[in-house]
């Protein structure tokens, strides 16, 4: 069964939270992060992406970068930008986007649950990205950005969250992107104990977003265990920062694809090969797929609607039946020769938050030749695949809104 426990968080003061909280390290490149943090000395990007405070010529994996993260985090504490709570608590973190609210429970997940697959994963992690985040945790001695977990809905937890979140939030601000962020501290020990006990009966948690952060926390946790001759399992390094959302509240957006060329095919040859697997219907407007099995194609300033032929549809395998897997098998690999989209430099991925106009812009500019718009993967598909011990194709899900870094920080000791 899963473990989720309260902890003593370091948090920004309410009047500073809007300036401190930042987008996650992995949704901005270094140049975008420099622009985002410009003029804001207490942006948490200075911890999550500390290269923005160094010369741009320095490699982002240079030891100086991780040292800068530690230095900036310690300075935030010294200056009173971040303050430690007086006891271990659970927290409620709410996000509102386009009038829709999701309520997450903030606490610490258990490192051994990651290794024992009580916390289920649906993506492969890359060793270089694992090492980057592991180095960040090792040097800062902190989990400074939460992992996004989900679990089957629970009426007891929902009831307590609804009751507490009906009161005035301790932190409440609207970020520049229009997303509202709120935080409540659950100070009642009885409620904390009830939540911890209730979650102890949950069989599994699922990583929705943050596979590399999870892996890094687990790797460093194991390292600390082995290095401590007096290890007893209660140390803070055995746990890592996470926000736990009930599955019914989550919103998964489309994760679209752009390809740089037609793999030596003419446009006519490409469409001829495509017709072996799909019906092709020219559209008068942008194609945002309205159902599973429908894929949009944008090429040469025209939109098309693709539907897989019946003889290839209804695959019972939970992975192969995903739209992103269908596209990968029959088009990206089968026609365009992109065997491994994780490593190919001929493909790019665009989260649905950027809109279909971004696909048109990049194709019309000549940077890319064609784009595919996808129907979002469902949370049920994600959980079914994780339960089956299988792995989704890369870039299958795009969750919005993103959790903000800096709202909560968990130290390893």
Image (spheres, rainbow, N blue to C red):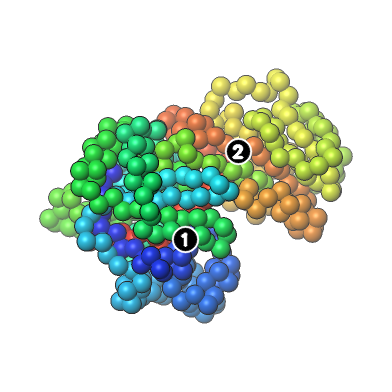
At a point 49% along the width and 45% down the height, the residue shown is 101
Viewer-nearest residue: 304 or 133: 304
Q: Indicate whether 20 appears above or below 388.
A: below
Q: Quadrant of the N terminus?
A: top left
**Residue extending furthest toward the bottom:** 55
Front position among marks 1 and 2: 1
Q: Indicate whether 192 appears above or below 139.
A: above
Viewer-nearest residue: 46 or 114: 46
Please provide percent x and percent y for residue 268. Answer: 87, 39
Residue 235 placement, left or right of 246: left
At a point 50% along the width and 55% down the height, the residue shown is 180
At a point 41% along the width and 42% down the height, the residue shown is 245
**Residue extending furthest toward the left:** 230
Please provide percent x and percent y for residue 108. Answer: 30, 49
Looking at the rendered structure, which numbered label has been put on residue 20? Answer: none
Dot 2 crowding, Cα within 10 Å, few <14, some 14–19, many 20+? many
Residue 79 visible in the displayed image: yes
Question: Tag 2, which secondary structure?
Answer: loop
Q: Indicate whether 299 appears above or below 58.
A: above
Q: Disc 2 designates what residue?
A: 376
Dot 1 crowding, Cα within 10 Å, few <14, some 14–19, many 20+? many
**Residue extending furthest toward the front:** 167
Please provide percent x and percent y for residue 12. Answer: 36, 66
**Location of residue 334 (image quadrant):** top right
**Location of residue 27 (image quadrant):** bottom right
Q: Quadrant of the C terminus?
A: bottom left
The residues bearing labels 1 and 2 have C-alpha atoms spaced at a distance of 29 Å
Looking at the rendered structure, which numbered label has been put on residue 173? Answer: 1
At a point 38% along the width and 65% down the height, the residue shown is 14
Q: Earlier in the sequence, mark 1 or mark 2?
A: 1
Please provide percent x and percent y for residue 218. Answer: 33, 50
Residue 211 visible in the displayed image: no
């Amino acid at each position: 069964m899963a473990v989720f426990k309260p902890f003593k968080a370091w948090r920004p003061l309410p009047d500073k939270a809007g300036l401190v909280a930042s987008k996650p390290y992995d949704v901005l490149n270094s140049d975008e992060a420099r622009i985002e943090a410009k003029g804001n000395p207490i942006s948490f990007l200075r911890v999550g992406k500390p290269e923005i405070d160094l010369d741009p010529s320095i490699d982002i994996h240079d030891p100086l970068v991780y040292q800068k993260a530690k230095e900036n985090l310690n300075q935030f504490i010294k200056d009173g930008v971040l303050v430690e709570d007086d006891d271990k608590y659970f927290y409620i973190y709410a996000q509102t986007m386009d009038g829709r609210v999701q309520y997450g429970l903030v606490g610490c997940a258990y490192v051994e649950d990651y290794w024992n697959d009580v916390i289920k994963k649906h993506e492969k992690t890359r060793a270089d990205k694992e090492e980057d985040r592991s180095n960040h945790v090792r040097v800062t001695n902190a989990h400074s950005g939460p992992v996004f977990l989900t679990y089957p809905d629970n009426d007891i937890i929902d009831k307590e969250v609804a009751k507490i979140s009906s009161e005035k939030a301790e932190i409440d601000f609207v970020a520049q992107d229009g997303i509202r962020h709120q935080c409540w501290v659950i100070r009642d020990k009885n409620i904390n104990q009830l939540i911890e006990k209730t979650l102890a009966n949950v069989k599994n948690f699922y990583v929705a977003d943050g596979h590399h952060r999870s892996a890094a926390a687990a790797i460093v946790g194991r390292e600390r265990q082995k290095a401590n001759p007096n290890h007893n399992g209660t140390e803070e390094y055995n746990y890592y920062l996470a926000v736990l959302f009930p599955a019914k509240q989550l919103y998964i957006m489309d994760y679209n694809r752009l390809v740089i060329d037609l793999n030596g095919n003419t446009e006519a040859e490409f469409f001829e090969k495509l017709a072996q697997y799909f019906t092709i219907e020219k559209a008068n407007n942008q194609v945002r797929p309205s159902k599973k099995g429908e894929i949009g194609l944008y090429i040469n300033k025209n939109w098309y609607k693709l539907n897989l032929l019946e003889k290839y549809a209804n695959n019972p395998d939970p992975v192969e039946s995903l739209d992103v897997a269908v596209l990968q098998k029959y088009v990206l690999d089968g026609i365009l020769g992109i065997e491994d989209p994780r490593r190919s430099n001929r493909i790019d991925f665009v989260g649905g938050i950027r809109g279909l106009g971004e696909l048109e812009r990049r194709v019309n500019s000549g940077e890319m030749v064609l784009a595919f718009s996808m129907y979002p993967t469902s949370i049920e598909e994600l959980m079914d695949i994780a339960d089956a011990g299988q792995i989704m194709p890369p870039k299958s899900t795009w969750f919005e809104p993103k959790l903000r870094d800096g709202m909560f920080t968990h130290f390893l000791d």
